[in-house]
Image: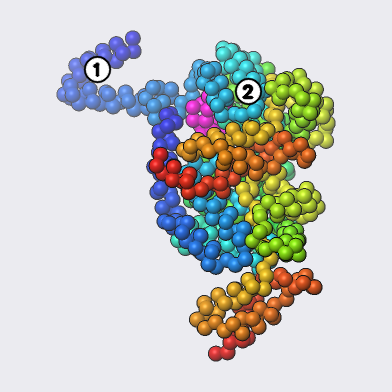
Amino acid sequence: MDVGKSHYLQMLMLPTKLFLCDLVVNQFAALQENLDKKLFGQHLVSKVVVKAVRGFLNNTNAKKPLALSLHGWTGTGKNFVSKIVAESIYKKGLQSKYVHQFVATLHFPHAHSINLYKDQLQSWIRGNVSACPRSLFIFDEMDKMHAGLIDSIKPFLDYYELLDGVSYRQAIFIFLSNAGAEKITEVALDFWRNGRTREDIQLTDIQNALSVSVFNNKNSGFWHSTLIDRNLIDYFIPFLPLEYKHVKMCVRVEIESRGYTVDEDIVSRIADEMTYFPREERIYSDKGCKTVDAKLDYYYDF
Amino acid sequence: MKLLKAAVVFVLAPTLTPAFDPLSVSVMVGGAVMAWHLFSSDSWLKCRFQECCKKNSTVNFTALKAQLDNRLFGQHLAKDVVLKAVLGFSNNPSPKKPLMLSLHGWAGTGKNFLSQILAEQVHPAGLRSKFVHLFLATLHFPHHDQVKLYKEQLQNWIRGNVSACPSSVFIFDEMDKMHPGVIDAIKPFLDYYEEVDGVSYRKAIFIFLSNAGGDLINKAAFDFWSSGKHREDIQLKDLEPLLSVGVFNNKNSGLWHSSIIDRNLVDYFVPFLPLEHRHVKMCVRAEMAARGYAVDEKIVQAVADEMTYFPKEQKIFSDKGCKTVQAKLDIHEDFVMRDMKSRV
C-alpha cells in the first residue's frame, strides 16, 4: 500500500472529521478575550493557556495529545478556565457532546470498583476519540483520584501514533486539582512580604518550589508523581490565591451580569465579608471568589 | 509465460463461446481475471490497493542507516546494535529463531521512536501496518487476575498473525509493568523451534521496551562524563555487566528478564543513554524544521534551557529526554515565526 496515499486520504478526511466535531471557527480571538475579561488575578494562566491551546490546535502534526494540569487554591478559577477553553473550541461549550467532564469523587467513588472504572474509562475514551479525534476530557479533583485509575489514562497521553487503530494525538486532556496549593501560596506570600508585585511572579519560581518538595515526595499525595514520571503533562499551570481587589472584581462582574448598577459601597462590603488568610496579614481570600454571588442576594433586595 | 497464456486465452475465448460477440466475451473474461486477482493474495493488483505481506522482504541498509542518523539523536550504541542486528537477521535467508531486541533506557530517549523507525523499514506503513502490532502492558493487560485470559488471547493473536504474515513485527511496551505470566506465554514463540504447531516464527521480529535498568545506564553515562571521557567512547561491554548484576539477577527489580534470559532468548540488549543538552537542541531543531519554520538558534537555546536536567549540581542529562519539547516550542512561538510560516 502506498503510505503517501493513505496519509493524503487522512488529511482529506480531517476537515470533515473536525466539522463533525462541531468546532468553533475562529477559536483564538474568543479565548484570549474571554480570559482577559473574565479571569481575574491569574496573569500566569492567561499567558500560558492561550499559547498552549493555540499552538496545539494550529499544529496539524501533533505528536501527543495536549495535557494541561491546572492546580491551585480553591475558587481561583480552574473550572472556569476549562469552561472558557471548551467554549472557545466547541460551539456548545461544556454542553457539547464531544466535551467530557469527570469528577473523581462523583464518577469514581468506590475504591473497590477500581477495575470496573478502569475498563469503563478506557472504553469511553477510546470510543469517543474514534468518533471525534478532537475530543476534550476534563478530569476534576485529580488529587482525590485513585492512582491506578490515573495509570489507566496514561497510555492515551503518550506519544503513540496509533493505539488499537485509534489516534489520540488530537485530543485535549485537562486535569484540575488542589494539589500544590499550599506551596503556590507560600511563593505568593514570599513575593508579597518582600514588597514585590504579584505580576512579578514567574512560572519558573513556582515550578522550582513545587518540584523540590512535592514532586519528589511520593507521600505528598500529589498525583502528578505518577504522570510526571513519564512526563506526559505538557503544561503545569498554577493558580495563585485571590486577593481583596480580585474579589471586588468578581463582585462587580456578578452585579453587572444581573443587570444592576455597580454600587462601590456594596462591593466593598461584600468583599469585606469574605474571610482572608494568613491570620495576621489577611491578604488572600479563603474561598477565592466562591460564595460571592450568594452574598450578593443578601444586599440587593428586589 | 504468463502473459503468453493470457494472450492465448483472450484470443481463443471468443471462439469457444460463439453465443456472445467477441467484445462482450473479452470484457467478461477480463473482469473475471481482475476479480480473481483482487481476491487472491499477493497478486500485483491487490497489493496496489491494499497492504500485502512481502514474502521475501529484506531491509534496505542505506535507508535504515539514513533514517537512524537523521532522526535518532545521541544514541550511538543503539544505532550500532540495531543496524547490525536487523541487517544480519533480514539478510539471513533462514534464521534459526525470531529476532528479539530488548530496548532499555530512561524515558524520552527514543525507544518507541526507534521501534517505529524499524517497523517502517520492514513494513512501509510502519505502526499503521496490519502486520505491526503494538501491545501496552497497562492498556492491553491491565488486570493481574485475568492473566490466563490474556495468555490465551495473546498466543492466539501471535499465532494467527504470524501464519498470515511470517515477517510480522510485535512491539511490547512497558515490559517492566507486565505480569510475568503473560511474558511466559510468549516464550515458546521466541525459541529455536523450526515450527510450532505448523507455524514458523523464525522470520518474526519481537521488540521489548522497558525503563528497567535506566537508572543504571544513567549512572554509567554519568561516570563516563565525570571521568572526562567522550560519550561516544561508551561501549556495550561497559554497560552489560552493570545491567546483568543490577537488573537481571535482582528478582525484586520487577523485571521478567530472569526467565527469558535464562534461556538466552534475547538476541540483543539495546541500552539507551540519557540525552544531553546538545541532543535536546537537535530535537528542537528537527521539530522546527518539521513544522516548516526557519530554525532560529535563539529559540532553540531558549527551549533547551527550559528543560530540567539531572544530576542536580552538574545538570548534564535531560530529565525527560526529548519529551515535551514540542509543547515548549508552542510557548516560544511568536508572531514573527507565524508570519514566516504563512509566507512559506
Looking at the image, the residue that sits furthest to the front is: A195
Q: Residue at x 61, y 42 (%)?
A: B302
Q: Relative to A162, is B240 on the left or the right?
A: right
Q: Amino acid at mark 2?
A: Lys
State the image coordinates of residue A68 (x, y, percent, origin top left). 61, 53
- Is the image coloured rainbow, by chain, by secondary structure, or in one colour? rainbow
Where does residue B202 sit, x and y in percent of width and height?
61, 19
Relative placement, left or right, of B56 versus A268 is: left
In this view of the protein, which residue sits in the foreground, A62 or B280? Answer: B280
Q: Quadrant of residue A246?
A: bottom right
Residue B334 in percent (x, y) is at 51, 48
Given the image, what chain letter belongs to the residue carrying mark 2?
B
Q: Which mark is residue B79?
A: 2
Task: Please tell me whether mark 2 sits on a helix, a strand or a loop.
Answer: helix
Mark 1 or 2, closer to the camera: 2
Residue A121 makes an appearance in the image: no
Query: Is residue B308 found inside the magenta-colored segment of the image?
Result: no
Identify the residue at image location x=47%, y=56%.
A28
The quadrant of the rendering that contains the C terminus of chain B is: top left
Cα distance, mark 1 to mark 2? Answer: 54 Å
Say which residue label 1 marks: B10
| Disc 1, SS | helix
Q: Which mark is residue A34?
A: none
Give, as a three-letter code, the residue at label 1. Answer: Phe
Q: Which residues make up the magenta segment?
A: B118-133
Can you name the residue that lies furthest to the bottom here? A302
Residue B15 in view here: yes
Earlier residue among tags 1 and 2? 1
